[in-house]
Image: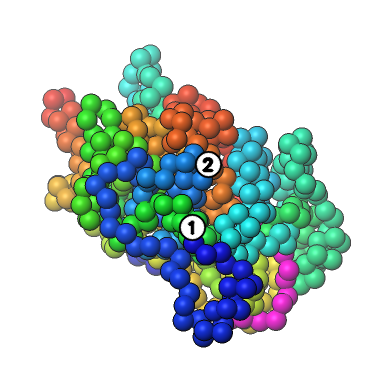
């Protein structure tokens, strides 16, 4: 067990000029055999490993990662956490995740800076207003703490918003989840990595999977750039690269990989203390603790593995937000980046078993994976440990596409896809 | 910014003048054999997609030009267009030969089917 982080350890290390901090995780060489191997050390993969070790006592496991941990979409998102989806299966898994976020920092002994500052989802057309009312009713039946708010309440919560009733997309109201908010995305990956590592999980970075070996429809191991690893259970959690990894096992996926971009402005004084999503005009914004406005929008419309998006998509997002928040019109943007998101046809994730015995997959989180990390890891670990889908994961099986049981969030959740 | 050329009218413009419409060469099996179509075939038609890191084949539409649909071959890693060709055509042979993985399998089955016919 690692020494716990606390105010005392902070004081003690301050006395030593911070020269004696222990490493947060080891960098072990891969063993020749593990009970299970997770492919992909992003938030979802590390959370899966952590809960496998913690909840299911499977500690002889490894997480292999092509690059560095948390370097993919976990470090590229806009850190929004909410659970007000339309469909019951979605509500169950996203609310599990949101509720786990509330105590995650204590559980991991790592400050993930979960900030339940409230998520305001604007209604800017009559259609959107009614769609959110429908979601509000569904969420109320599921027991979520969410409500519709009026334009004047929106103005109270977000004073910088453009409340001109004669603008192209006036604010007609909003759907408000006060318990939603943001978190520190890197800290979530680092916290899970440190937690998993201290329970004995090997996190192997710079280790790219090049093949999945099988024998009679069963998984027998992995070929990697750091040697062969034998294992009977593989969990593939590689987001945008899930199709390329699953191809190695001969499983074709209902996934298209596209680029989703985000950007931050120069840091300014606090102007917005919640998350605002303007889905009709395709933009969402919050302010980081450093003062940067964190901005995201929709995906580029074509397949892309390059982690660089197109300029028109950014321009579209910024145009929308300048219209919604006129005061940001003269801000300069500091950085922009792209992440490769794995889009499914019904915009819901895929969690569960595959046609290959011992091969499990957790993917398809598309543009909204960060908020789901703790819940996704929780149910996927249970699925791998017990070789059957966790009840919350069951509706998200790969088989739903042949059975016609879609979990249609593509328009209903009003996420800017 | 992608620069696209329409193979029908020859218009050249950036990606906002065109409409990207997803994977090319998707065949609806129910059109050919509506009685014996399985759930899996229908799933493959609706949802399963070639998603290569590298050479990919797509449909585009000449939105602000002639309005016609056409095909494009593009690398999803370098973003470079390899070819533009008509909606009724298969890719140029030299580009088709570069296809890998599930795309190569698809073109092999497609050309063998057509040579039989």
Give the Cα separation between the discs numbered 1 and 2. Answer: 16 Å
User: Which stretch did the figure color magenta?
Assistant: A265-278
In the rendered image, residue A243, in percent from the top left (x then y), is placed at 34, 45
State which chain disc 2 sits on: A
Tell me, for residue B29, which label it has, or none: none
Q: Indicate the secondary structure of the residue bearing disc 2.
A: helix
Please say whether residue B36 is one of the residues in the magenta stretch: no
Can residue A241 be seen here? no
Residue at 14% in and 47% down: B97
Residue at 75% in and 65% down: A167
User: Which is the main secondary structure of the residues drawn in magenta?
Assistant: loop
Residue at 47% in and 78% down: A20
Q: Residue furthest right?
A: A152
**Camera-nearest label, 1 or 2:** 1
- Tell me where residue A161 sits by quadrant: bottom right
Horizontally, residue B66 falls left or right of residue A164, namely left
Tell me, for residue A55, which label it has, or none: 2
Return the residue at label 1: A1
């Amino acid at each position: 067990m690692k020494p716990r982080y606390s105010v005392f350890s902070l004081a003690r290390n301050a006395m030593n000029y911070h020269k004696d901090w222990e490493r947060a995780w080891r960098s072990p060489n891969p063993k020749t055999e593990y009970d299970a191997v997770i492919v992909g050390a992003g938030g979802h993969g590390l959370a899966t490993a952590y809960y496998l070790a913690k909840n299911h006592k499977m500690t002889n496991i490894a997480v292999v990662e092509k690059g560095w941990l948390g370097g993919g979409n976990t470090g590229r998102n806009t850190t929004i956490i909410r659970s007000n989806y339309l469909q019951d299966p979605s509500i169950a898994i996203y609310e599990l995740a949101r509720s786990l976020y509330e105590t995650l920092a204590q559980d991991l002994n790592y400050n993930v800076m979960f900030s339940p500052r409230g998520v305001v989802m604007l209604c800017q057309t009559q259609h959107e207003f009614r769609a959110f009312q429908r979601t509000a009713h569904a969420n109320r039946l599921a027991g979520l703490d969410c409500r519709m708010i009026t334009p004047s309440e929106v103005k109270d919560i977000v004073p910088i918003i453009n409340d001109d009733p004669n603008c192209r997309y006036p604010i007609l109201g909003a759907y408000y989840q006060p318990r939603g908010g943001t978190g520190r995305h890197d800290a979530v990956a680092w916290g899970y990595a440190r937690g998993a590592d201290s329970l004995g999980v090997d996190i192997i970075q710079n280790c790219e999977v090049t093949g999945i070996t099988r024998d009679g429809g069963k998984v027998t191991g992995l070929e990697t750039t750091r040697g062969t690893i034998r294992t009977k259970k593989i969990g593939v959690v590689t987001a945008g690269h899930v199709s390329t990894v699953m191809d190695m096992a001969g499983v074709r996926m209902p996934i298209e990989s596209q680029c989703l971009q985000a950007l931050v402005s120069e840091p300014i004084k606090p102007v917005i203390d919640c998350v605002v999503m303007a889905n009709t005009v395709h933009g969402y914004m919050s302010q980081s603790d450093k003062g940067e406005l964190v901005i995201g929008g929709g995906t580029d419309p074509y397949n892309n593995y390059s982690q660089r998006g197109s300029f028109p998509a950014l321009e579209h997002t910024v145009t929308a937000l300048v219209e919604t928040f006129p005061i940001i019109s003269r801000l300069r943007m500091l950085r922009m980046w792209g992440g490769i998101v794995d889009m499914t046809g019904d915009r819901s994730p895929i969690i569960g078993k595959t046609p290959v015995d011992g091969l499990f997959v957790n993917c398809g989180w598309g543009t909204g994976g960060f908020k789901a990390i703790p819940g996704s890891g929780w149910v996927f670990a249970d699925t791998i440990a017990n070789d059957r889908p966790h009840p919350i994961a069951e509706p998200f099986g790969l088989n739903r596409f042949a059975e016609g049981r879609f979990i249609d969030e593509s328009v209903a959740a009003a996420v800017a896809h | 910014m992608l620069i696209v050329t329409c193979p029908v009218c020859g218009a050249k413009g950036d990606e906002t003048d065109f409409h990207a419409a997803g994977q090319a060469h998707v065949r609806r099996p129910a059109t050919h054999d509506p009685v014996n179509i399985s759930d899996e075939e229908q799933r493959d038609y609706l949802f399963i997609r070639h998603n290569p890191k590298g050479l990919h084949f797509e449909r585009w539409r000449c939105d602000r030009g002639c309005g016609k649909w056409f095909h494009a071959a593009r690398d999803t890693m370098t973003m470079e267009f390899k070819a533009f060709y008509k909606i009724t055509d298969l890719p140029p042979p030299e580009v088709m030969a570069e296809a890998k993985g599930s795309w190569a399998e698809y073109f092999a089955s497609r050309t063998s089917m057509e040579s039989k016919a």
